[in-house]
Amino acid sequence: MERIVINGGRPLNGEIEVSGMKNAALPILMGCLLVEDKCIIENLPEIDDVTLSLKILSAMGMSVRMINRNTVEIDSTFAVGGTAPIDLVRKMRASYYLLGAELGRFGRAYVGYPGGCDFGVRPIDQHIKGFEALGAEVNVEGGYVEVIAKDGIRANNIFFDVITVGGTMNVMLAAVKAEGTTIIENAAREPHIVDLANFLNSCGAKISGAGTDTIKIKGVTELHGCTYAIIPDMIEAGTYMFAAAITKGNLKITNVIPKHLESITAKLEEMGVEVEDGDDCVTVKYCGTLNRINVKTMPYPGFPTDMQPQMGVLLCLCSGVSCLSEGVYDNRFRYFEEVKRMGANVKVDGRTAVIEGIEKFSPAVIKAVDLRAGAAMVLAGLATVGRTEIEEIRHIERGYDDIVGKLRAVGADIEKVTYPDDTEPVSKAN
């Protein structure tokens, strides 16, 4: 059993460099399947979901060679469709990008149903709607999703009923080689959608409009290899911005795109935290009492749902009563049961949480119930005077590159420990 142990209550001061974006890296890695050539992908975060993705691609017959810890060379020339191991696919939500990539390359896809964090119903019905609009038949049975375009992929106009990040990217992957022009309306606008489009365009695709609600994809017959660097991770950056505020510290966070952080910056400033933008950095400084605010998560450019748990923990230490509303997913407030162990005063009603601020948290043993909730537990521990132990840290390691090492470098007393045979914890280097 591994845990993260934090002796908190220390202000964090110094500089943290942000890694590549998880939510861009995963679809881009899967998108390499479309390119019957070598691609070099740079600025990859060293996280479990990337490691898992590379194992899946390797198992499908693709040549995967690590050049360094953040750069990989992938040759998909001899990839075999429908061979992704189901035991690996089930461990990660983003494995569903194989559906679009396999469909785009082979005209059919056969992939195990995806796994990943469990916070409510996250159907792939809009993905299926998009595939069917492109001329494919979709069957879901026996734990697998099978997509077959008997007469080939055909371009079409697709209007999503709801904004869907995964659906938008899956249709992009499937349509990039379709004859004609595919138009996606009510498309998601997140930065990682733009990054996927830029990667595919670097390989010879013709995609325009990414970052707006209308994306046009003019099909091409083939793609070529390229060298491409993943954009910085806005959620990792936002997490460290909140770490500065919750520990009453002063952090310079580098390798970021400040524009991607505007909704996060706005809420911190509303709380009374000082945020200064640079060209590729932000500096966050605690300036006194944190003010209560109201927050609702929304699709980009609104406040991101993946920052909601971190925000929830921060609001627990704000003066007054705050209201936190989740506008994207159901059942994403389970982490509040953990911070209640630390003394948080929270009432949850459906997608809304009313949070009455407290002066401080009390030390406790808590667990990470999903990836971003795990990051929120780390923030809670950093703010707590005394010893906090976090269980189920595998969720955290799915999406944060060396979170323990990065926080330790700016003054946190934090380490990963292992409990062999139910004995006392033993420190483990990270």
Image: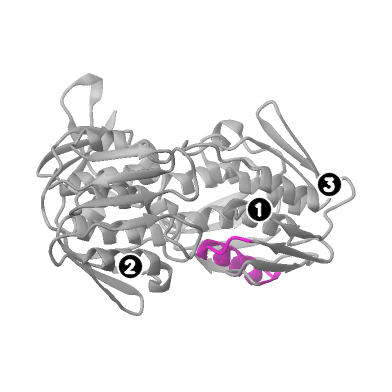
x and y percentages locating residue 316 in the rendered image = 23, 47
Please state which amino acid type lies under the numbered disc 2. Thr
Please state which amino acid type lies under the numbered disc 3. Ala
Circle 3: element type? loop
Label 1: how many residues lie within 10 Å, few (<14), some (14-19) or many (20+)? many
Number of residue marks: 3
Asked whether, in this view, residue 168 is left or right of residue 382, the answer is right
Pick whichever of labels 2 and 1 is earlier in the sequence: 1
Q: Which numbered marker is on residue 160? A: none
Compute the Cα span from label 3 to label 1.
15 Å
Q: Are marks 2 and 1 in contact (CB under 8 Å)?
A: no
Which residue in the protein does label 1 denote? 170
Q: Which residues are magenta?
A: 187-208
User: Does residue 398 sit above or below 291 in this rendering?
Assistant: above
Which residue in the protein does label 2 denote? 265
User: Does residue 275 sit above or below 177 in this rendering?
Assistant: below
Of the residues tagged 2 and 1, which is closer to the observer?
2
Of the residues tagged 2 and 3, which is closer to the observer?
2
